């Protein structure tokens, strides 16, 4: 079928809106009409020289929409269902079977390489379009039975896509991967979409001290409204000492690192109390070098993907918390028509918008 999609043709260029051909759903596949799709920083990876998923490509991996058709062998989901699209996984490897699909043995191939494509352009040439099992910067997307999560029809569907990646990642890191305890202390480095979701989740978990660190004052203001009990400027030379002071002298039990900066990661480790854990979420921008005794006293560093969530159980939990006004993720979102995707990318990079959501239908 003919669909409209935002295509990245040149690593350094703008997205172009094109009319392309999408194949019919094959075995195990689900055709979804996209109502809204979030812009996540991971979507810019194909701009990095040498990255395996190269332009021309359709990215987008925070889609939500309505099922239009299902391929052979799909059961339990029917046309008309409202779904959030999340990351893909194989369902058969040890980690999938053990309830950790974000650590699927085939995670990279299924989500980050673009894969064999169901999309061809106006000249009949294939475009990479299996990004996170969806490539949802488009009016329609082919997902799989493994990466759709059905949601209630009374919800604002067009806003739900980011629950499939960035928001899930920040929240599940606190609630699932770290299992932050009530009364504990959590410090979050970077108050973007991922970090602010971690802040909201820390409040849900009942953390007593929640510290957000960022370079932008407006993001720190929002962090306080969403549950941070204190905020600190990232440029403060006394940052680590301030965190120790705010956590009663011992340091934080949990740190969530979303900036990817090795220097910030080092500070996050320093800010931990003995036995504390830092979860690394940001795409790391260089090698990490730590002083010899940095991890003494039982400190832990854990790399985390998608918060170690099982989307089919975790996303409904977030939706219920949103209904109870305990997880107001919609406050992070600003919507754009799909045709304004270049503005959305610019506003996300400059910090003007925390979580852009593109509306392909508008
Ligand atoms: N691990 C995963 O599964 C996963 C999932 C989604 C996103 N990500 C990654 O997580 C990262 C964060 O995503 P996001 O959407 O929240 O991005 P974002 O750009 O909205 O947020 C990052 C924040 O870090 C702040 N920051 C940058 N340098 C800083 C410093 N030195 N000190 C303090 N704050 C600083 C920025 O001001 C910004 O607010 C990205 O690298 C993204 O690719 C990882
Ligand atoms: Zn697997
Ligand atoms: Zn993402």
Image (spheres, helix red, strand yellow):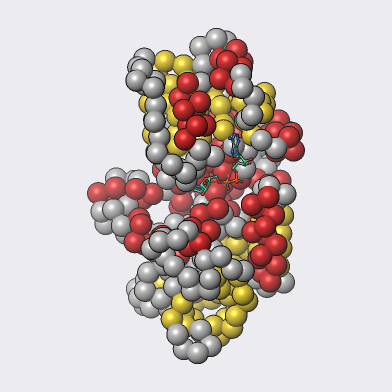
Rendered-image quarter of ligand 1: top right
Can you see residue 283? yes
The answer to which quarter of the image holds residue 108 is: bottom left
Count of marks, rendered view: 0
**Residue 60 at what x, y percent from top left?**
54, 63
Q: Which one is in front, 132 or 244? A: 244
Q: Residue at x 46, y 28 (%)?
A: 266
As displayed, is residue 216 above or below residue 266? below
Can you see residue 70? no
| Drawn side of residue 277 relative to residue 251, left or right | left
Residue at the far bottom: name it: 123
Q: Residue at x 68, y 71 (%)?
A: 339
**Residue 109 at what x, y percent from top left?**
34, 61
Q: Which one is in front, 231 or 263? A: 263
Q: Residue at x 66, y 65 (%)?
A: 342
**Residue 164 at what x, y percent from top left?**
52, 54
As displayed, is residue 220 above or below residue 353? above
Residue at the far top: name it: 249
As displayed, is residue 89 above or below residue 128? above
**Residue 46 at what x, y percent from top left?**
48, 62
Q: Residue at x 61, y 26 (%)?
A: 211
């Amino acid at each position: 079928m003919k669909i409209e999609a935002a295509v990245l043709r040149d690593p350094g260029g703008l997205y172009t809106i094109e009319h392309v051909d999408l194949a019919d759903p094959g075995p195990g596949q689900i055709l979804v009409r996209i109502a809204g799709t979030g812009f996540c920083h991971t979507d810019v990876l194909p701009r990095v020289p040498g990255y395996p998923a190269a332009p021309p490509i359709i990215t987008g991996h925070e889609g939500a929409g309505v099922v239009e058709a299902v391929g052979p062998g799909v059961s339990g989901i029917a046309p008309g269902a409202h779904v959030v699209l999340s990351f893909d996984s194989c369902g058969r490897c040890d980690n999938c079977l053990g309830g950790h699909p974000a650590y699927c043995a085939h995670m990279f191939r299924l989500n980050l390489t673009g894969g064999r494509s169901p999309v061809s352009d106006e000249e009949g040439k294939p475009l990479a379009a299996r990004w996170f099992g969806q490539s949802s910067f488009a009016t329609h997307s082919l997902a799989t039975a493994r990466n759709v999560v059905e949601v209630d029809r009374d919800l604002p569907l067009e806003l739900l896509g980011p629950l499939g990646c960035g928001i899930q990642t920040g929240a599940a890191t606190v609630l699932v991967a770290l299992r932050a305890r009530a009364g504990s202390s959590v410090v979050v480095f970077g108050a973007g979409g991922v970090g602010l979701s971690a802040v909201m989740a820390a409040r849900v978990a009942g953390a007593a001290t929640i510290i957000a660190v960022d370079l932008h004052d407006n993001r720190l203001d929002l962090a306080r409204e969403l549950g941070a009990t204190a905020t600190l400027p990232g440029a403060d030379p006394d940052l680590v000492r301030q965190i120790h002071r705010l956590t009663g002298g011992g340091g934080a039990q949990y740190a969530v690192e979303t900036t990817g900066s090795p220097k910030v990661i080092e500070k996050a480790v320093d800010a931990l109390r003995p036995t504390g854990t830092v979860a690394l979420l940001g795409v790391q921008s260089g090698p990490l070098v730590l002083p010899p005794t940095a991890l003494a006293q039982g400190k832990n560093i854990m790399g985390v993907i998608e918060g170690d969530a099982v989307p089919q159980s975790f996303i409904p939990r977030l939706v219920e918390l949103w209904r109870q006004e305990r997880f107001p993720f919609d406050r992070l979102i600003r919507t754009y028509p799909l045709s304004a995707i270049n503005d959305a990318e610019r506003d996300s990079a400059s910090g003007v918008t925390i979580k852009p959501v593109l509306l392909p239908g508008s």
